[in-house]
């Protein structure tokens, strides 16, 4: 069971950026066209960039609401908990739910910064990325450095030189992880897959700086092959399917040359769940045994070995995965709360995790709830 003194670490939560994040940080020449919060009767509070509406909050800020109140309609700051966007109130909400530390993904920029990828002015997009990262590294996380794990983004649509420069700039300022793409080849902007050597400079940089890549499901687009209804009137089909994005990403990665060439690179499949992992590993090794002789794959290392040494998956609620934890790898499992999104269990997070781990030995439960995250994200307990 979960020891009482275990400090739960969630490796997938979200910050709703306060209205002045970009206006406070962008160069003067970009303030008029950069992200700013506006209000109208149709969209409520929403962001505007380059004069165009840029998304609302909807299911991204529903912590504490009854499930019957969930929906896709716009939401104003007045209608969400202050903990969504106020760091001091966030800590109070973490204390209420029994979570010690969090790693927060962006909201308006998208899980991997994709909200800036379509901007006409690529220099503006780069400035927006840097402004967001400075918000995380100078304001959000330093307020409570033992409670908030810095996660930053990159301009993945831009030059590799700019991406690598931003890795080193943010690493120097204390970032602990980079949010990136689960399936770059699927975005339709000409990026190659993880099998390409295009990514080598990025992989070298994150290996050199010991920064895990946190790849959130959905950062590679919608799940493949869904019906029109699934993304309109039957949205639960889409929500149920997103974990398969992570499974496909894992399959691409364990068959890629990444971990042969960069053995220090780590991937965390954020919001992936874990119940699918045993089948994928068993199937991949089965295929490796039969087909490695005539394919361009590592003939000496099983795909599952790459998983165990370099990949990690968190869960919110996944009894099937917990039962199969030894096939997944107890040291490859982490926990996520998903505050303040619609999957979160605030304010009952610790209670529900304790129930999930009730039949798990204490040492394993501690690794899953805290130890693995501290190790992978280089986030040791404070004395």
Image (cartoon, helix red, strand yellow):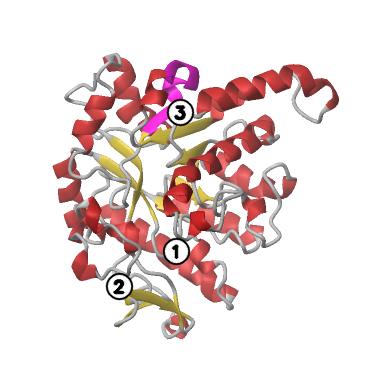
The N terminus is located in which quarter?
Answer: top left
Q: Is 270 located above or below residue 157 in the figure?
A: above
Numbered disc 2: secondary structure: loop
Q: Is 130 located above or below residue 362 in the figure?
A: below
- Write the residue at 20% across / 55% down: 65
Residue 194, image x, y percentages: 67, 44
Residue 383, image x, y percentages: 22, 32
Q: How far apart are the alpha carbons under marks 1 and 2?
A: 13 Å
Magenta span contains residue 292: no
- Write the residue at 52% across / 52% down: 219
- Picture quadrant where residue 382 is located: top left
In the displayed structure, does residue 107 sit left or right of residue 124?
A: left
Q: Nearer the viewer, residue 168 or 355?
A: 355
Residue 167, image x, y percentages: 53, 53
> Which residue bears the numbered disc 3?
275
> Which residue bears the numbered disc 1?
109
Q: How far apart are the alpha carbons under marks 3 and 2?
A: 38 Å
Q: Which is more N-terminal, label 3 or label 1?
A: 1
Q: Which is more N-terminal, label 2 or label 1?
A: 2
> Which residue bears the numbered disc 2?
19
In the displayed structure, does residue 31 sit left or right of residue 370?
A: right
Numbered disc 1: secondary structure: loop
Residue 142, image x, y percentages: 28, 53
Q: How far apart are the alpha carbons under marks 1 and 3?
A: 29 Å
Q: How many marks?
A: 3
Q: Which range of residues does the magenta coloring cover?
A: 324-334
């Amino acid at each position: 069971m979960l020891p009482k003194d275990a400090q739960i670490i969630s490796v997938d939560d979200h910050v709703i950026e306060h209205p002045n994040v970009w206006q406070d940080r962008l160069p003067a020449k970009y303030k008029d066209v950069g992200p700013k919060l506006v209000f109208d009767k149709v969209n409520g509070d929403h962001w505007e960039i380059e004069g165009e509406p840029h998304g609302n909050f909807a299911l991204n800020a529903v912590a504490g609401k009854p499930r019957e109140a969930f929906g896709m309609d716009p939401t104003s700051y007045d209608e969400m908990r202050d903990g969504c966007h106020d760091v001091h109130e966030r800590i109070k909400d973490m204390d209420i739910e029994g979570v010690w530390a969090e790693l927060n993904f962006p909201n308006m920029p998208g899980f991997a910064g994709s909200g800036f990828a379509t901007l006409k002015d690529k220099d503006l997009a780069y400035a927006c990325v840097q402004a967001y990262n400075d918000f995380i590294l100078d304001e959000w996380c330093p307020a409570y450095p033992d409670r908030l794990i810095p996660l930053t983004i990159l301009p993945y649509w831009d030059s590799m030189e700019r991406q690598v420069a931003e890795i080193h700039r943010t690493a120097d300022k204390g970032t602990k992880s980079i949010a990136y793409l689960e399936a770059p080849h699927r975005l339709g902007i000409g990026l190659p897959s993880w099998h390409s050597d295009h990514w080598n400079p990025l992989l070298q940089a994150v290996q050199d700086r010991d920064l895990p890549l946190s790849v959130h499901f959905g950062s590679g687009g919608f799940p493949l092959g869904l019906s029109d209804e699934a993304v309109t009137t039957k949205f639960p089909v889409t929500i149920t399917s997103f974990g398969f994005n992570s499974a496909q990403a894992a399959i691409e990665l364990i068959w890629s040359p990444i971990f042969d060439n960069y053995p220090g690179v780590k991937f965390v499949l954020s919001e992936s769940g874990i119940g699918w992992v045993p089948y994928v590993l068993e199937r991949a090794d089965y295929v490796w045994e039969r087909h490695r002789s005539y394919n361009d794959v590592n003939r000496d290392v099983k795909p599952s070995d790459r998983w165990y040494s370099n990949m990690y998956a968190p869960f919110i609620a996944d009894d099937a995965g917990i039962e199969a934890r030894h096939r997944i790898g107890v040291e490859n499992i982490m926990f996520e709360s998903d505050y303040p999104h619609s999957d979160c269990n605030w304010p009952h997070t610790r209670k529900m995790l304790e129930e999930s781990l009730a039949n798990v030995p204490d040492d394993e439960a501690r690794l899953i709830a805290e130890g693995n995250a501290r190790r992978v994200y280089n986030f040791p307990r404070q004395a």
